[in-house]
Amino acid sequence: MKICVIGPGYVGLVGAAIFADMGNQVVGLGKNKEKIDKITKGVMPIYEPGLSEIILKNVKEGRLKFTTSATEGIKESNVIFICVGTPQGDTGAADLTAVMAVAKEIGNNLNGYKVIVTKSTVPVGTNERIEHVVQENMPKGGEFDVVSNPEFLREGTAIEDMRNTDRIVVGAKNERALKVMRELYKDFDAPMMECDLRSAEMIKYASNALLATKISFINEIGQLCERADANVQVVAEGVGLDKRIGRAFLNATGVGYGGSCFPKDVAALYKTSTDQAYDFKLLRSVMEVNELQKFNFMKKITKAMDDNLSGYTFGVLGLAFKGDTDDIRESGAIKMIRMIRGHGAKLRVYDPAAMENTKKVLGHDGIYYSKDMYDTLEGVDALCIFTEWNEFKSIDLAKSKKLMKGSLLFDARNLLDQKAVEGAGFIYIAVGKRTNGYTEDGDIVSTAILRNGK
Ligand code: UGA
């Protein structure tokens, strides 16, 4: 099949790579010439394990190319994927400017029957708007169908997620479009769910919102566990064994969920509900809990430091919104760092992939960007772990203790083994469980005396 993928971001690049690798003829279309040239040479604008290799292989074997020419990209193809961004607008709704501009461009270049497939996350009713815009801009007698085909891949495991997806959702209006989609996905080992356009659009939002709900739910269970002296990790394990519930997305976190999808999509779905004169109360709570989670974790930090962070230095491991990505959009870690810095403390920070992105956003004021994990620990009064990178799990605790000045360790991801951390002489404060950082009454211990006489 001849495919054009518009928008060389996460979804677009991964889609282009996989479809080409499955034997299709694919052209990736973008606006920025420098970016497109780099992608062709295997230099990706995003950090995604394995992506560059697949792209280079398929470019070399002649199945994949990239261009900035809309005419070339669209006219040569019979299936056009829209994969441009839909960032959060001022009202909370998804900003559809880029999607509609692309729809116009497709209309302008329509030659022969094409299937226009939306992979960008778009609110209910958007595909009908796309259809309208294409119609308004196409030459007389132009033929096309719109299809909603939402994407469920996660950053960091995007290639694997697309290859081994649980399901392929295809919203379409007629058999002609469906036939093309069945042919396109015939080699994927996953059930294809065929439905109407609007339901397909809603499936994407409902999926992300439900996953975010699971996280906010377990975060609140964690709050209760701390108070009642239970352990949220054990509870998640036990609850997750129920196949109807499942263990996934039940990791409590002190920094809340982040990234370019959950925060924006939950807000957009809430906006859709209010637009439909419905108050989706549960979603409101999901968002509120997610914000509160960071403030609650910050309270633990300030309490342990006797409400005075000024003059202290914090080490921070993890800046990205989750492990295996360089993405810091809506990252809980960045928000925590802003709060810690706002309290007058200095920071030494490290992330295996997100250093450059963080420098652009936080600058250098009060922040030292460490060379590696252990450089971060040199002389710090307290250490915070904010992102779930595997690398941090195997940290040498004895070595870390020696490098640090203080002995406080705040683990906002429950990444480390409690016994090992406490055994190494740290005062450990984590999420949803009591540790040696708590008094018998469940309060955070005051560590003033323990911190080297400070
Ligand atoms: C998410 C969805 O998982 C994908 O299915 C979807 O395709 C994608 O959004 C999208 O809409 O494009 P992603 O944002 O890459 O993928 O990241 P996730 O792995 O879902 O994690 C989101 C956030 O939740 C991260 O901050 C992560 O640390 C947090 N999280 C995840 C938890 O706090 N606890 C968990 O148990 C799981």
Image (cartoon, rainbow, N blue to C red):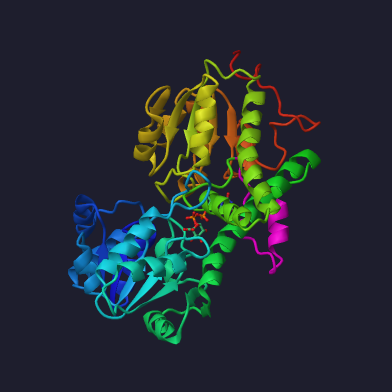
Q: Position of residue 201 (x, y in %)?
A: 52, 66
Task: Left or right? Give the position of 142 relative to 261.
Answer: left
Q: Main secondary structure of the magenta part?
A: loop
**Figure quadrant of residue 183:** bottom left
Judged from this view, the residue extending furthest toward the top is: 453
Question: What quarter of the picture does the N terminus occupy?
Answer: bottom left
Q: Position of residue 445 (x, y in %)?
A: 71, 26
From the viewer's perspective, is residue 118 above or below residue 85? below
Q: Nearer the viewer, residue 269 or 257?
A: 269
Q: Nearer the viewer, residue 117 or 348?
A: 117
Question: What quarter of the picture does the C terminus occupy?
Answer: top right
**Figure quadrant of residue 14:** bottom left
* Res 232 visible: yes
Q: Which residues are magenta?
A: 234-254
Q: Position of residue 32 (x, y in %)?
A: 23, 52
From the viewer's perspective, is residue 31 above or below residue 164? above
Residue 326 part of the magenta-drawn span: no
Q: Residue at x 57, y 45 (%)?
A: 415
Residue 235 part of the magenta-drawn span: yes
From the viewer's perspective, is residue 313 above or below residue 232? above
Q: Residue at x 44, y 26 (%)?
A: 378
Q: Residue at x 61, y 17 (%)?
A: 308
Q: Residue at x 43, y 68 (%)?
A: 162
Q: Position of residue 242 (x, y in %)?
A: 71, 66
* Res 186 visible: no
**Figure quadrant of residue 11:** bottom left
